Image: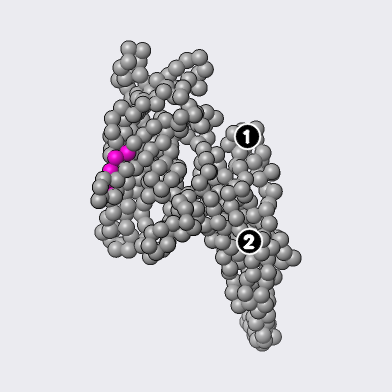
Amino acid sequence: MKLQKIFTYCMMGVAALGITSCNDDWNEEQYQHYIGFVAPLDTEGNSVGVTTVYVPLTRVNENGDALYGEHGLSHYDLPVQVSGSTVHSNNITVNIVHSDTLDYLNPARFSNRTDIWYKDMSAFAEYPSQITIPGGKDIELLRIKLDFRNLDLSDKYVLPLTVDHPMRNPLKNFATAMLRVLPYTDYSGVYQATNLKYYIIEPNGKDNEEPGAMNTVQTYAVSDDEVFFYAGTINEESQIRKSFKIFAQFIPDEGDSAHGRVVLWGDPASPEMAFEQLSEAHYTILEVEDEVQSYIMRKTVIINGVDYKYSDTKTAPGTAINYHIKGTMTMERKLNTQKPEEDQIEF
């Protein structure tokens, strides 16, 4: 009997709460209207603590011509968001300013490895100092114009921006955007290199009989038809990477952009690398519709006949270690044809 009374009282309490809550509470703001960026931070890989965004090296118009008149000029649209449970009714003008976050992020993340500290990209970017979010809208896009023409991607660049407004989001990951901008082309990205082997060249000039295995090779856009990558197994975390840059130009066959030659050369600033391309490489681009999901297009770039040698005098100063690299590199992009390509590019 007591349990029945308790249950009855509980139900009456719930009903009373229901009656008192039947008003216009949900038409009123439940959360503060805060202003911030939509720029979620990377949580894995080499860019933890910043937001990696991929942008076409050159923005083009509907005719395929450079949108800003020259190749190497592009833009990125950064969303600026008003949060809250209701739509704001008035226009909100937001100041966008430079952030000093790199001064704290670099030492905390990389300690005394200043050679891999993020560099400020502000000199290569242009954006309005103010943006207005119209009443009735939650998001407005901040257009950031980018100049990649003189950007050396052997350094890692970050554009640090922050919101300057009384309603600035109190969460720093929303109030500040740390954009690591990477330009891309059809040829840049991460190539699988399990079929690419490296050999140590013996004093007699012959390759060692036990080649080392490669994993991946990351290429960085230089121009619409050129990329660079690091020789052998050297990567972007290496202290000596800048002395081992190899450039590659993709030269299409006449009337056939899906096939062509790949010409390699070493960085003229590093003659001690003694780079030499031993035979001509060729590329093929394959575009195949996914067998199950027809809106998915698989785009594959295959570089056959990679064959070069170089000398490493940096790892052990006073000693030259000569390498021979030979094999095939392959990069696949799985693209949703219903979405912009830049929203899907990942290295």
Q: Amino acid at mark 2?
A: Pro
Residue 80 lies in magenta, yes or no? no
**Label whose residue precedes the other's in the sequence (2 or 1):** 1
337 relative to 251, above or below: below
Q: Secondary structure at mark 1?
A: helix
Q: Which mark is residue 176?
A: none
* Identity of the residue drawn at 54% across and 30% down: 239
- Count residues near mark 1 (Cα–Cα under 10 Å), then give few for <14, some for 14-19, many for 20+: few
Task: Give the colouring mode of the picture.
Answer: one colour
Q: Which residues are magenta?
A: 258-262
328 relative to 55, above or below: above
Q: Secondary structure at mark 2?
A: loop
Residue 145, how many percent across, how many down? 55, 56
Question: What secondary structure is the stretch in magenta mostly built from?
Answer: strand
Residue 97, how many percent across, how many down? 68, 57
Residue 335, how many percent across, how many down? 37, 57
Q: Amino acid at mark 1?
A: Thr
Residue 261 lies in magenta, yes or no? yes
In this figure, which residue is indicated by the disc labeled 1?
114
Toward the right, the furthest residue is 166
* Identity of the residue drawn at 26% across and 45% down: 253
Toward the front, the furthest residue is 69
249 relative to 39, above or below: above
* Identity of the residue drawn at 63% across and 59% down: 174
Q: Quadrant of residue 340?
A: bottom left
C-alpha span from label 2 to label 1: 31 Å
Q: Quadrant of residue 221?
A: top left
In this figure, which residue is indicated by the disc labeled 2?
128
